[in-house]
Image: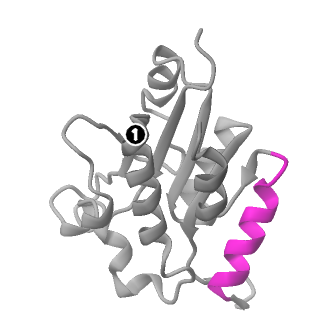
Amino acid sequence: MQKNQKALIIVDVQKAFEHEKWGGRNNLDAEKNISRLLTFWREKGWTVIHIQHTSDKPDSLFHPANEGHLFKDIAKPLEEETVIRKKVNSSFIGTNLEEQLRSNEIDTVVIAGLTTPHCVSTTTRMSGNLGFDASAAFGLTDQNGTYYDPEMIHRLSLATLHDEFATVMTTDQLISNWMVK
């Protein structure tokens, strides 16, 4: 098996997250950072895998009949890039993502996407020791009615992943560390 085969997994960068129902969010540059990673990855000729959340419920923003199901233009897949559709938070459940990674002998993955405490976190936890970046979070209200702002949710979600399931890096750190690889 070749060593250092890399894949960029871009999770749920879809128009549904532009809807007002989500409320305020942090890291308004997440998509720009994802685009930077995508450009870097394509220039290196490394594997890119796009994950697309798909709902069976016609009233869901993620239903294929709704515009929210579409990828945002800033991170749109190229024709030759893999697109995997999922129906739950994890990109591994009910998909062939693991098979894709193993069959392509990929041993290093970077995960970026929306949103940090949901699909990005769940995918990262399931994939194990990964590096990931370029994610964002929306504010959340707990069962007692306490609101937590998007930045706090984002930072706590990353903290629960760092050194346990992933190596958390900024886009700049990742690109500069891997520039010569």
- 25 or 133, which is in the foreground? 133
Q: Quadrant of the N terminus?
A: top right
Please, which residue is most extreme toward the top here?
Answer: 1
Q: Percent from the top left, x then y, of residue 77?
A: 27, 48
**Residue at left offset 54%, top offset 45%:** 90
Q: Quadrant of the C terminus?
A: top right
Q: How many marks do you count on the picture?
A: 1
- 24 or 175, which is in the foreground? 175
Colouring method of the image: one colour
State whether residue 14 is above or below residue 147.
above
> Magenta part of the protein: which range?
149-164
**Residue at left offset 32%, top offset 54%:** 55
Q: Percent from the top left, x then y, of residue 52?
A: 35, 50
Q: According to the image, label 1 marks what residue?
A: 49
State whether residue 83 is above or below residue 163.
above
* Number of other residues with Cα within 10 Å of mark 1, as a class: few under 14, some 14 to 19, many 20 or more: some
State whether residue 93 is above or below residue 66.
above
Please, which residue is most extreme toward the front here?
Answer: 180
> Is residue 159 highlighted in magenta?
yes
As helix, strand or loop, the secondary structure at mark 1 comes to strand
Q: Percent from the top left, x then y, of residue 53?
A: 37, 53
Q: Percent from the top left, x then y, of residue 122?
A: 62, 50
Visible residue check, residue 86: no
Visible residue check, residue 119: yes
The quarter holding residue 44 reads: top left
Q: Is residue 95 left or right of residue 72?
A: right
